[in-house]
Image (tube, helix red, strand yellow):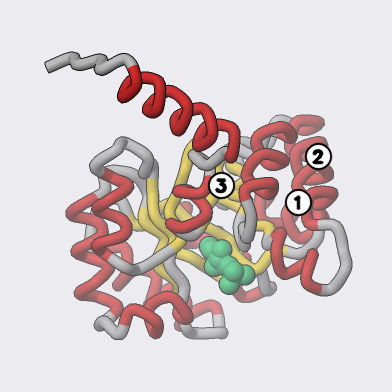
Amino acid sequence: MKFFVDTAEIDAIAELHALGMVDGVTTNPSLIKKSGRDILEVTKEICDLVDGPVSAEVIATEADAMITEGRALAKIADNIAVKLPLTWDGLKACKVLTGEGNMVNVTLCFSANQALLAAKAGATFISPFIGRLDDINLDGMELIEDIRTIYDNFGFETQILAASIRSVNHVLDSARIGADVITAPPDVIKKLALHPLTDKGLETFLKDAADADIKIV
Ligand code: E4P
């Protein structure tokens, strides 16, 4: 399973990238706003740092304008994935932009039928939003499961990019179900390393090493 980092903060991406944990990056207008940076500048910096797909989202809502913005974003670097909302106009733009050889990430997916349409429009990635469904007491993981089943039933090659991930359990469940990619905030990725028994065990080993005066170098 690939790990994308869901942020536009260069330092956070660089820290995880140095450990080989970054297969790609996703941004959205809210994350760009949070970074306080110019979208074109910060996206270029991310693309220079990371080899994998970097999602940059359009802000137009009408297909022709989305296509114009998508082409402008795609010019930033070869590894841009143009991010389009799952609307009818977004699907039209998806068909055109993928036809021109661009990667497209169709975002704001909340139903399996929407995911089916995105695959038929040739999307490279579909982004079902797990956390936002959980927020309204619906089951985000059930959506990932349904999309996995449908895509496998018909051999769609669109990659399932589990998004709106809020917890380490979202990552684990996405991996179990077979999402192709997860995109998670840096702190969630870092929390994957934590376990209280690891901390407790290390404490004991360090105490015993000190008691026995063990030295390695
Ligand atoms: C990424 O592609 C999505 O825009 C992001 O995961 C949304 O996350 P949120 O629901 O926590 O804002």
Front position in the image: 196 or 41:
196
Would the CB of label 3 be found within 8 Å of ligand 1? no
Query: Decide: marks 2, 1 in contact (CB < 8 A)?
Result: yes
Compared across the picture, whether 92 is left or right of 189 comes to right
Where is residue 35? Give x, y as percent. 33, 78
Mark 3, Cα crowd under 10 Å, few <14 / some 14-19 / many 20+, is many
Disc number placed over residue 116 in the picture, else none: 1
C-alpha span from label 2 to label 3: 18 Å
Query: Three-letter amino acid code at disc 2?
Result: Ile
Mark 1, Cα crowd under 10 Å, few <14 / some 14-19 / many 20+, is some
The residue that appears at 31% across and 56% down in the rendered structure is 13
| Quadrant, the N terminus | top right
Query: Three-letter amino acid code at disc 1?
Result: Leu
Residue 124 seen in the current view: no
Residue position for label 2: 150
The residue that appears at 44% across and 60% down in the rendered structure is 26
Query: Which of the four quarters of the rendered structure image does ligand 1 lie in?
Result: bottom right
Rendering quarter of residue 139: bottom right
Compared across the picture, whether 118 is left or right of 31 comes to right
Identify the secondary structure beneath mark 1.
helix
Query: Decide: marks 2, 3 in contact (CB < 8 A)?
Result: no
Residue position for label 3: 182
Compared across the picture, whether 193 is left or right of 217 comes to right
Residue 212 seen in the current view: yes
Q: Residue furthest left?
A: 217
C-alpha span from label 2 to label 1: 8 Å
Disc number placed over residue 19 in the picture, else none: none
Identify the secondary structure beneath mark 3.
strand
Identify the secondary structure beneath mark 2.
helix
The first of marks 2 and 3 along the sequence is 2
Where is residue 110? Give x, y as percent. 76, 64
C-alpha span from label 3 to label 1: 19 Å
